[in-house]
Image (tube, grey):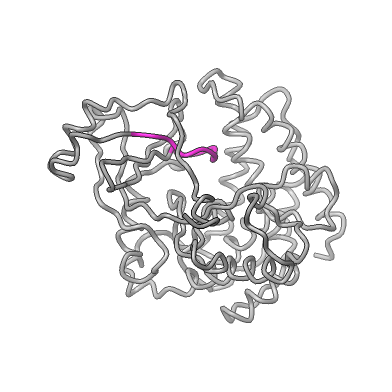
Amino acid sequence: MSKLDQLVDQAQTVRDGEELDMDVLREHLRPVLGAQVENLQVKQFPGGYSNLTYLLSSGDQKWVLRRPPFGSKVKSAHDMGREFRILTALDKVFPYAPKPIHFCDDHAVLGCDFYLMSYIEGLVIRREYPAGLDLSPDQVRQQFFALFDVLGDLHSVDLQKAGLTDFGKPQGYVTRQVDGWSKRYAAALTPDAPDFDPVMAWLRDKMPAESGVVGIIHNDYKLDNVIWSLDDPMKVIGVLDWEMATVGDPLMDLGCTLGYWAEAGDPEFFRQYRAMPSDAPGAPTRAEIVERFSERTGIAVDNIDFYFCFGLFRLAGIGQQIYYRYAQGLTKDQRFARLIDKVHSLRQMCELVIGRSRL
């Protein structure tokens, strides 16, 4: 086993309260997996605050099962059927998506929709670079540019060839996103939630005209949703978590990814909640990412302050929705307890962006 082989993202014991009924699942999957269901075992991947991801194995064979979180009532954010459909479409036009295997909408099995897909073995990088992955500043820069190059490749997929021309409603997409996340944030308010009304007003006031650019957008593209090759950690081999993918303005997708991007020059209140080592020596700045993205895709990136601020606000909305579930006792996952602090941090960052903006 090589040093990098030891860094493969490892599934762990299933968390309390998130167990699967394996007897029922084995019987359901028998027509799909055949005799392999007899020795079917389950573990759970760590990380993530949204849909739950499990590793199923039987001998040397491995598959991944995805299902919504327990207690969630936000159907639009956990649509397994939608995720399965886009994986089916991307299978022929985008080489980084897992292969879809089976979709189930019979709630008698697991109490929800779920699906099975191929398992891609590789390196997943989360908040910090793992010990043993010693990248130089130049390699860090190359790796992060590769991350955004693949995002640009997704936005350049031909919708006609993918069969996804009817997958979303690109006209009015930006307006719907701003209005939609404003309503979702208001619906998930808790007594300790920050006031985003000034931010929402600024976003509505500075909203750009329709760009006319339409593409497939991932809607949650970040480092821990990407798998890197063990042979070449500069090379992306997989992109995960497609449940919020749609067709719309690629610049909104870019802004959402930049919402996760805490660079070295950002204030500590924002950097302390970063989800990836985007402030590591060699990592590109948001300005450098925007410039490269524009050159690669041919899409003019104007009004970046709007898209970045929206990305921050949307991330706050997602965090508040999850924190609301925790505050209501709908989940016991203690990781969610600190999300309210991150929501406050995102509110401060929005203020900073708005204060500096020339829009």
The image shows residue 303 at horizontal and vertical percentages of: 72, 68
Q: Is residue 190 above or below residue 237?
A: above
Q: Is residue 243 above or below residue 302?
A: above
User: Which portion, as a residue range, is magenta?
Assistant: 42-52
In which quadrant will I find the C terminus?
bottom right
Q: Residue at x 73, y 64 (%)?
A: 283
The image shows residue 145 at horizontal and vertical percentages of: 63, 70
In this view of the protein, which residue sits in the foreground, 76 or 342? 342
The image shows residue 294 at horizontal and vertical percentages of: 64, 77
Marker count (numbered) = 0
In this view of the protein, which residue sits in the foreground, 5 or 313? 5
Outermost residue on the top side: it is: 329
- In the figure, residue 113 lies in which quadrant? top left
Q: Residue at x 44, y 58 (%)?
A: 246
Taking the magenta stretch, the answer to whether it contains residue 51 is yes
Q: Is residue 40 above or below residue 285?
A: above
Our reading of the magenta stretch's main secondary structure is loop
In this view of the protein, which residue sits in the foreground, 208 or 148? 148
Outermost residue on the front side: it is: 1
Q: Residue at x 50, y 57 (%)?
A: 2
In this view of the protein, which residue sits in the foreground, 81 or 200? 81
Taking the magenta stretch, the answer to whether it contains residue 160 is no
Q: Is residue 243 above or below residue 208?
A: above
The image shows residue 164 at horizontal and vertical percentages of: 35, 65
Give the left or right position of residue 96, taking residue 342 as reference. left
